[in-house]
Image (cartoon, rainbow, N blue to C red):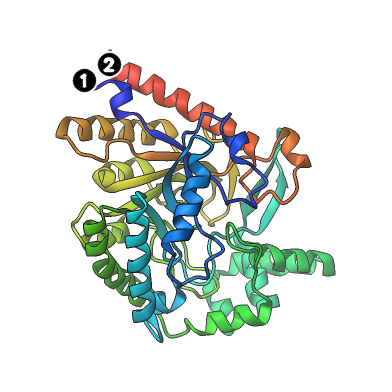
Amino acid sequence: MPSQNETGFEYTWRWFGPNDPVSLKEIKQTGATGIVTALHQIPVGEVWPFEEILKRKRMIEAEGFRWSVVESVPVHEDIKRRSDNYKEYTENYKCSLRNLSQCGINRVCYNFMPVLDWSRTELNVQFRDGTFTSKFELKSMAAFDMFILKRPGAENDYNDNIKDKAQKYFSSLNEYGKQKLISTILFGLPGSNEAYTLDEFRTALANYKDISEADLLKNLQEFIKEITPVAEESEILLGVHPDDPPMSLLGLPRVVGSKENLQKILDASDLLNNGLTFCTGSLGAGYKNDLVDIAKSFSERINFIHLRNVNRTADGDFIEVAHLDGDVDMYGVMKVFVEEQISRAHKGRKDTHIPMRPDHGLLMLDDRAKKNIYPGYSIYGRMKGLAELRGLETGIRLSLEN
């Protein structure tokens, strides 16, 4: 059996660049060896210049790290809708992949969520142990949708139970509470402080009014067919990130959240370059998703791993919890990936060292004093998670050797 050094995960850490309140020098002490980052300063849809990529890479390497994964090269909304200037933006995307490859960076995570990225209804919830976390409640999203956004037909997307809860919740809010809900749902994307105004958001939603889930899935499949050959020639492994949460929101279609659709996405191109980012938190928020089964089904096509945990309900509510707590069978998922790495080593595959990062973390200890911490991305919570996950991995590897 190959040793752990031949098959172990590459421990990585998401870093939002020079403006991240968590510095590379601090990350050095967490046990991570690889950095996951992006050029957030480049407008979505524009080509990532070779010089800017190289500048960021040198910054990372100067602190003794490797730029392991790009998360993300954002996909322009025109590509998701397959309208307007999507051809130009697709060519720009290909050019960015080629430039990344020339700089020696060979893994790219991306998502295909329309308008919104990951969505929560509360970002600063005190947990039972005194730490702080985030959560999603469908009643809060429904209240925003029906009574603040006032999206036409919104009431048709919720059952009577959720509508009743949403009405009672909205009635309990004062003006501050309403503004807080708005700012939370329209919160800026990771690595960005920019958020939609309500009017901008209504306009963005209107652009998707004629696009169904089937349309969006087809558009994603076409995008994959167009960029995967470039990824193959550039020796880049792609990993589409699941929707977070994996359900339609505010009338927007979402298609990367079920086992059935993941299969269709992989079927768009059989090349290993067309792979998945396996996020246990995003997939885990789906009440019907069996993550161990999904991991086993697609283990050969996993190009990047995000590990975090949630407690979830059948209504679609969830709260983020510590990495080894919650409803996700972290042991079962980790065991699948350890076995997959061993299998890849036996087969002689080059992509044995799958990058893994502790995704999100509870806000705890001295992180409370740091300013501008992006929700889920404090240092202590993620460091604790990484330590727990490394211990779990080590135990599984030793048990497989005996």
Q: Number of marks in the image?
A: 2
The CA span between labels 1 and 2 is 8 Å
**Pick the front one: 47 or 382:** 47
Task: Answer left or right for 385 relative to 168.
Answer: left
Name the secondary structure under disc 1: loop
For mark 1, what is the residue? 1
Task: Answer left or right for 290 relative to 308.
Answer: left
Q: Amino acid at mark 1?
A: Met
**Pick the front one: 335 or 160:** 335
- Quadrant hosting residue 149: bottom right
- Quadrant hosting residue 253: bottom left
Residue 64, image x, y percentages: 49, 34
Q: Amino acid at mark 2?
A: Glu
Whether residues under marks 1 and 2 lie with C-beta atoms below 8 angstroms apart, the answer is yes
Name the image quarter holding the C terminus: top left
Determine if residue 286 is in view. no
For mark 2, what is the residue? 401
